[in-house]
């Protein structure tokens, strides 16, 4: 579903991503790890077509993201690390706007939005402007907006920052269920326990270079450490 | 469907913003309304009197009005293009919501169309405030019937769109063609070039050679004869010509110019959208992959080297000053405007001798001197609203760093005030010196001018700074947007209002002297002292109270 071929991105002389080759299949919950400034966000922006690769190619659903981006983006969701929302809208208005952009049929939309708001306990705040939301509420709206058009691929940059335990659990379950239902989830995170718990395969990059990729077992074998992901991560990077 | 979604988005944003406004104090609302109304009315009256006066001048009256129209719309056209180009860069390329929109399945053309309308409205609305009273007063002074107003309204929209497409197109082209590193240098050179071309195309005649009466000569000088503004290919020419025709009830011609404007607007929009379809995403990606490092080597070098100079203010202030200088330098849009406005004034003053103003009779010389003083002050006034006012707001979300540091907000406010004051004081005083030298103004008048500039710097900078602190807008990163809020509008109106008052107070005793109401030099001196006293008192008040008010507001702010 997500495929990169020799993906490289340079900012001036700085190489942020270096010849990255990834292949993420249908229904995978893929963890993308690395220290600060490793190139995670840059890679994700390349995957979503927001940046243009210096070299190499990104293919999603078999389409080149730089060329057929409309086809790809209508079946994909992206949750950035610092998401933007129209602050002068209420959550409901914003979600309605997003559904219209994705051309979702009008009748069920209201019900769907209500369902999501209920699910994330935002119903009582739905008519308050987003600028008055707390960080976590903000994040919840972003997540709902990403789920509303039922995408086949979700690409997330640091999803759990600022969420309370209950919501973290909710999001975790959503991701797990989606992947069971054949959706692909590509997730960058610093929360190693989360990756350990829900991700099928894990990829670690550092300085733009791929360090290791595989299931937890495979990573253990490669690093020669039979412990938690944290120890493996610290050894490899 | 998608356009529909954007339309709803806007409607919601506008409705919610108004609802928020209603929550604020009614007093503030009424005050804004009153101020705006007052501003429009005063502007209308000034224009009306001017138009009526000019129409009344025998023989040349209509020529002068005509030239004024060409010139006005030409200047407006250029300013609109400039403003559109700048605002396009921030709304179309930098603004955060573009990333959100690009992550949706939207064509570049669709996103661009939406962002273009946004930036065009943002850049145009302030000019409406100038344009509407000007147009209406023109109509009233000409005793025109309603058809003229309809035509003016009809011209107006395609005119704004044309300027917008050119401005946005220019920005897109520059961003596309130029590597980011060179962008600032090129923008600077282009602006300089445009300014030079316009300046060169002003046709000046020496008074002795002109063979005109002094009144006509002066009017000629005050309304520079810019050849370019008569160009048949300029939309501003079509607009001026159309309005003139409509005022003469030649509606067929007027309609022709409307069609010309309309078709050009449509054509340009079509071209621009097509270009955006191809280039917007690519150039947006370019802007967002620009290498952040190394660009600023030069500034880092120079600014770091002069750091020791500021050590005398203490470690913390030094840090603030250096930070402000770096930020200013890194924002080319900021200082190019600065350079252009003061640069034009400078070049103009240096050339005064060339036009032999110094040969004029004292009365006209004084008029010139006062006009120059007003030009300096008005430039300072609008630039200080534009640059000084948003400074506190631009600290933005990072403000808490300073807010929590032992420095305290108070110190930041006064540091910024001092730095801005020092810079603007030196620039304006030097400009004034040039003007005085060239006109051969000396003695009492010169002393008064120097004093007025000092006082006005205090007042204008203090006022803008104080109001900027009292009405901060920490949310937007775009200075133009910050300035167009309530506080910014208030600052601009207050600045310009005060300039007019101060110049009038300064000029008063000298006019009395020239007209013979004050007979001795001693009396003139006394009168001048009194008027300086008044200006000083008002200036100090306008400097200190807003600053204190801003300081209080900042201290009470919750983050
Ligand atoms: N627009 C840009 N211009 C220049 N350099 C950039 C740009 N964007 C990212 N970089 C550089 O690329 C490298 C990778 O950055 P990236 O944001 O991808 O890291 P990250 O892995 O997401 O880090 P974090 O865990 O802190 O989010 C960094 O060294 C960063 O400085
Ligand atoms: Mg990141």
Image (cartoon, coloured by chain):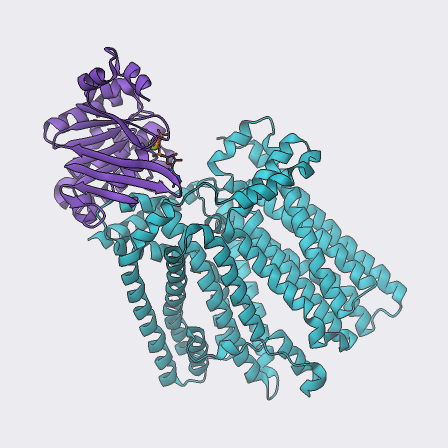
Chain colours: A purple, B cyan
Using the image, determine if residue B122 lies above or below residue B69: above
Residue B549 in view = no
- Which is nearer the eye, B497 or B90? B90
Q: In the visual, does B439 lie left or right of A61? A: right
- Which is nearer the eye, A61 or B328? A61
At 48% from the left edge and 38% from the top edge, which residue is drawn? B396
Quarter where residue B46 is shown:
bottom right
Quarter where residue B150 is shown:
bottom left
Looking at the rendering, the quadrant in which ligand 2 lies is top left
Using the image, determine if residue B5 lies above or below residue B512: above
At 70% from the left edge and 75% from the top edge, which residue is drawn? B354
At 82% from the left edge and 61% from the top edge, which residue is drawn? B527
User: Where residue B151 appears, x then y in whole percent?
Assistant: 39, 75
Quarter where residue B348 is shown:
bottom right
User: Where residue B407 appears, x then y in whole percent?
Assistant: 61, 29
Q: Which residue, as the protein is rendered here, is positioned at the far left?
A: A181
């Amino acid at each position: 579903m997500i495929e990169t071929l020799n993906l490289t991105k340079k900012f001036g002389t700085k190489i942020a991503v270096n010849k990255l080759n990834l292949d993420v299949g249908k229904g995978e919950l893929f963890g993308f790890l690395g220290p600060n400034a490793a190139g995670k966000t840059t890679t994700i922006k390349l995957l979503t077509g927001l940046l243009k690769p210096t070299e190499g190619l990104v293919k999603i659903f078999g389409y080149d993201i730089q060329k057929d981006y409309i086809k790809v983006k209508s079946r994909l969701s992206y949750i950035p690390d610092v998401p933007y929302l129209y602050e002068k809208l209420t959550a409901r208005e914003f979600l309605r706007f997003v559904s219209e952009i994705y051309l979702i049929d009008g009748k069920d939309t209201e019900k769907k939005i209500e369902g999501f708001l209920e699910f994330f306990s935002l119903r009582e705040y739905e008519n308050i402007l987003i600028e008055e939301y707390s960080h976590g509420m903000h994040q919840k709206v972003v997540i709902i907006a990403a789920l509303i058009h039922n995408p086949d691929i979700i690409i997330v940059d640091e999803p759990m920052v600022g969420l309370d335990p209950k919501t973290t659990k909710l999001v975790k379950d959503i991701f797990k269920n989606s992947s069971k239902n054949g959706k692909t989830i590509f997730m960058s995170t610093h929360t190693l326990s989360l990756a350990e718990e829900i991700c099928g395969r894990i990829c670690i990059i550092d300085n733009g270079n791929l360090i290791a990729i595989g299931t937890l077992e495979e990573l253990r074998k490669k690093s020669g450490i039979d412990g938690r992901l944290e120890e493996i991560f610290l050894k490899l990077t | 469907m998608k356009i529909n979604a954007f339309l709803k988005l806007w409607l919601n944003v506008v409705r919610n913003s108004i609802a928020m406004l209603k929550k604020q104090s009614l007093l503030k609302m009424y005050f804004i309304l009153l101020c705006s109304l007052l501003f429009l009315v005063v502007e209308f009256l000034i224009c009306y009197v001017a138009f009526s006066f000019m129409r009344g001048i025998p023989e040349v009256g209509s020529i002068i009005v005509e030239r004024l129209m060409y010139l006005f719309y030409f200047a407006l056209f250029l300013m609109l293009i400039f403003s559109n180009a700048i605002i396009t860069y921030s709304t179309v390329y930098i603004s955060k919501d573009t990333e959100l929109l690009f992550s949706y399945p939207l064509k570049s053309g669709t996103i661009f169309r939406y962002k273009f309308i946004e930036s065009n409205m943002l850049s145009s609305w302030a000019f409406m405030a100038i344009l509407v009273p000007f147009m209406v007063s023109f109509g009233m002074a000409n005793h025109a019937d309603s058809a003229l107003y309809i035509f003016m309204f009809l011209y107006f929209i395609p005119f704004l769109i044309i300027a917008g497409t050119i401005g946005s197109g220019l920005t897109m082209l520059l961003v596309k063609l130029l590597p980011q590193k060179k962008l600032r240098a090129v923008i600077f050179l282009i602006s300089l070039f445009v300014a030079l071309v316009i300046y060169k195309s002003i046709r000046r005649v020496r008074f002795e050679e002109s063979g005109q009466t002094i009144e006509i000569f002066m009017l000629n000088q005050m309304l520079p004869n810019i050849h370019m503004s008569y160009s048949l290919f300029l939309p501003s020419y079509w607009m001026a010509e159309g309005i003139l025709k409509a005022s003469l009830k030649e509606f067929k011609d007027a309609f022709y110019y409307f069609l010309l404007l309309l078709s050009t607007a449509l054509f340009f929009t079509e071209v621009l959208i097509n270009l955006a379809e191809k280039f917007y995403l690519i150039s947006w990606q370019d802007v967002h992959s620009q290498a952040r490092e190394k660009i600023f080597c030069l500034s880092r070098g120079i600014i770091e080297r002069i750091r020791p100079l500021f050590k005398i203010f203490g470690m913390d202030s030094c840090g603030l000053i250096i930070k402000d200088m770096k930020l200013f330098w890194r924002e080319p849009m900021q200082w190019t405007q600065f350079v252009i406005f003061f640069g034009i004034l400078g070049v103009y003053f240096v050339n005064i001798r060339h036009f032999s103003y110094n040969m004029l009779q004292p009365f006209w010389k004084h008029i010139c001197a006062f006009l120059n003083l007003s030009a300096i002050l008005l430039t300072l006034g609008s630039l200080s609203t534009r640059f000084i006012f948003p400074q506190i707001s631009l600290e933005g979300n990072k403000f808490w760093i300073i807010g929590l540091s032992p420095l305290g907000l108070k110190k930041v406010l006064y540091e910024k005030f001092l730095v801005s004051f020092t810079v603007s004081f030196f620039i304006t005083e030097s400009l004034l010196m040039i003007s005085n030298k060239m006109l051969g103004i000396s003695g009492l008048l010169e002393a008064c001018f120097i004093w007025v500039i000092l006082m006005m710097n205090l007042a204008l900078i203090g006022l803008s700074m104080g109001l900027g602190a009292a009405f901060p807008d920490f949310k937007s990163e775009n200075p133009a947007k910050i300035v167009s809020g309530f506080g910014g509008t208030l600052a601009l109106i207050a600045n310009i209002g005060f300039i007019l008052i101060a110049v009038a107070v300064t000029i008063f005793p000298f006019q009395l002297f020239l007209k013979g109401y004050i007979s001795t030099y001693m009396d003139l001196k006394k009168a001048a002292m009194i008027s300086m006293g008044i200006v000083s008192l008002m200036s100090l008040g306008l400097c200190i109270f807003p600053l204190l008010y801003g300081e209080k507001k900042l201290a009470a702010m919750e983050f």
